[in-house]
Amino acid sequence: MNTAIGTLIWALGGLAGAVFSLPFRKAKGWRYESYWLVYAVFGLVLFPVALALIVVPDLFGVIGGAPSGTLALCAGFGALWGIGGLSWGLMIRYLGVGLGLAIGCGLCSATGTLIPPIVKGQAASLVADRSAVVTLASVVVSLLGIVFVGLAGKSKEDELPEEAKKAAVAEFNFKKGVLVALVAGVASAGMNFGLQGAEWITAEGARTSLADVAVAAGADRLWSGMPVLVVVLFGGFIVNLAWCLVENAKNGSFGDYATIVRPASAGVVFWSGLAGVIWAMQFVCQKAGESFAGDIAYISFAIVMGSSVLFSSLTGIFLGEWKGTGLKTRVFLAAGLAVLAASIGIAVAAKML
């Protein structure tokens, strides 16, 4: 066990989650739903399956050896994430990278920590001992950080003239953005429950998991989380595929795909596909980092999401999304980032008690 390495890998995953949407800025000429489908194909299917095939011997045999109920559960929570993931793009459109990901990731981190024990009927474990209570406190602290970041966004809306807000975020709308962020953050927490739900009791009465089966098949423990990632992301892909095709039909944008062989569209495919690969890396890092973390692996999701908040806010500052704001707004933003950073530290310290 090396928790320092594990935490570093999780932080790198948070960085990927913070910047994944930047390549979309170069995806010009196609409707939103069309380039989002390209992102989904690369990020939810092609890249994770290709990586898993490389690092896990007999990948599909490993997956096929799991109980169908376990696979359905993991894919189902992936589908729940898919609903949140669709809202994620809209959240960024309305709030920008910095504010949008700060609120969305903060909510996702909090609910992702609480949902697994509640769904499993183990809610009492959240306050079972001092360590559990401190972990729960880290969730409450992260929610306080979200409040501060939200206040910064509201203050920004009040301070800046309309043209200044639109210059940084073309479709900036705080009220719409917060509503979308609520859906995106809460539903997206289904990703973590899916990733943590690939365990079952064998016929012999022992507890095993897809990760254990992958290791038994010859996979390194570092990559043992890839089979469940493939299953969860496939569930998310089905939701994204259905939504994109419905939007294509409604908007008459199927013609975008017919231009895929043209040089101008090649750029759309490249940048959208790159966004998908970068996005998927946050959860590749989450599962890889868990192999170094031993019995504190359960905080991986909180560290990844918390890191995304920090890096996305810094990205938003770099992109000028907070340019022209006053002292009040910047104090709220700084307080939010500090509190969110503290919540990560509390979560890590909880297991040391």
Image (tube, rainbow, N blue to C red):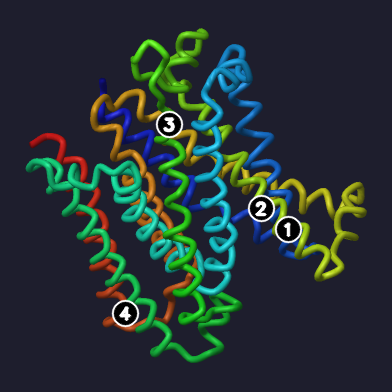
Q: Is residue 224 left or right of residue 253?
A: left
Q: What residue is shown at x 58% (from left), y 67% (from top)?
A: 90
Kind of residue indicated by mark 3: Lys
Rendered image quadrant of residue 87: bottom right
Q: Name the residue under label 2.
A: 240
Q: Mark 1 points at which residue?
A: 244
Q: Is residue 333 left or right of residue 27?
A: left
Q: Do the residues labelled 2 and 1 touch (CB within 8 Å)?
A: yes
Q: Name the residue under label 3.
A: 287
Mark 2 vs 4, N-terminal side: 2
Question: Where residue 179 sits in the image (x, y, percent)?
Answer: 47, 74
Q: Are marks 4 and 3 in contact (CB under 8 Å)?
A: no
Badge 4: how crowded within 10 Å, few (<14), some, or many (20+)? many
What is the total number of numbered labels drawn onto the structure image?
Answer: 4
Rendered image quadrant of residue 299: top left
Q: What element carries label 2?
A: helix
Q: How far apart are marks 4 and 3 (CA)?
A: 36 Å
Mark 4 vs 3, N-terminal side: 3
